[in-house]
């Protein structure tokens, strides 16, 4: 009697030997890819240790500073460049008191590494003052939009950045745009009035 329906391992397209051969090839390919990826990452990564001399472009002036890899931009500004406008109110930047502009965009100097600012244009609140002061600090004075002063520099820079991007902003848009800055004294109403005055060209 012929057993035409018998099934043997040799008849299978998927047997133990082919499985082991295939898995071995896959493992070899994975190992090769992993090693090449690690090599690429190692070649791309540049570990910096110890004090480094860098050049910061702050308020249109280039200055050399010596920083550790962990030094924040806020620390470099305050301790080496004597620019104390940006304030160290919160280490995580949640208060907005350390707001500065980097290539025109608002960033928290307390959470930005000084080395990350090298090669970029940094503007602090000091750039908005002087004999020909900007409209934003003028509006803050006009509307009495400051009390203790710790939040004020961050708010002034944040308003300037926001108005630059939204010159025709409404009150609702201003409130939304400035929600990253906190005032413990609660002068929000006067800050909004100052920002609206700038938008309307009142100062």
Image: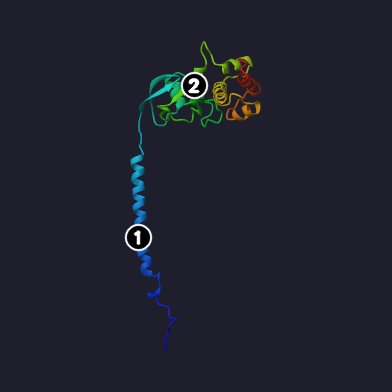
Q: Which residue is mark 1?
A: 25
Q: Residue furthest bottom?
A: 1
Residue 82 in which image quadrant:
top left
Given contact means CB atoms under 8 Å apart, are the residues at marks 2 and 1 in contact? no
Few, some or many C-alpha atoms within 10 Å of disc 2 (few <14, some 14-19, many ≥20)? Answer: many
> Residue 110 placed where, x, y %?
49, 28
Where is the N terminus found, in terms of image quarters? bottom left
The numbered disc on residue 124 is 2
Does residue 78 appear left or right of residue 176 in this picture?
A: left
Front one among 77 and 36 = 36
Mark earlier in primary sequence (2, 1): 1
Secondary structure under badge 2?
loop
Secondary structure under badge 1?
helix
Few, some or many C-alpha atoms within 10 Å of disc 1 (few <14, some 14-19, many ≥20)? Answer: few
Distance from the alpha carbon under mark 2 to that under mark 1:
58 Å
> Residue 196 placed where, x, y %?
63, 21
Against 21, is 117 above or below? Answer: above
> Residue 117 placed where, x, y %?
43, 28
Q: Residue furthest top?
A: 131
The residue lying at 46 percent from left, 21 percent from top is 78
* Residue 146 visible here: no
Front one among 133 and 184 = 133
Front one among 67 and 132 = 132
> Residue 181 placed where, x, y %?
58, 27
Closest to the camera, between mark 2 and mark 1, is 1
Residue 113 in which image quadrant:
top left
């Amino acid at each position: 009697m012929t057993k035409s329906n018998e099934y043997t391992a040799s008849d299978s397209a998927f047997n133990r030997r082919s499985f082991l051969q295939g898995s071995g090839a896959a493992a070899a390919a994975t190992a090769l890819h992993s090693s090449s990826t690690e090599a690429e990452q190692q070649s791309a990564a540049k570990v910096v240790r110890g004090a480094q001399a860098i050049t910061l472009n702050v308020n249109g002036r280039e200055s050399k500073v010596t920083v550790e890899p962990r030094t924040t931009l806020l620390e470099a500004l305050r301790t080496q460049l004597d620019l104390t406008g940006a304030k160290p109110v919160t280490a995580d930047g949640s208060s907005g008191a350390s707001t500065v502009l980097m290539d025109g965009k608002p960033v928290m100097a307390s959470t930005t590494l000084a080395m990350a600012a090298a090669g970029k244009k940094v503007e602090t609140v000091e750039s908005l003052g002087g004999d020909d002061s900007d409209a934003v600090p003028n509006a803050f004075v006009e509307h009495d939009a400051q009390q203790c002063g710790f939040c004020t520099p961050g708010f002034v820079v944040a308003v300037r950045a926001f108005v630059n991007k939204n010159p025709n902003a409404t009150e609702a848009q201003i409130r939304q745009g400035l929600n990253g800055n906190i005032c413990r004294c609660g002068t929000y109403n006067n800050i909004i009035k100052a920002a609206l005055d700038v938008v309307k060209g009142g100062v």
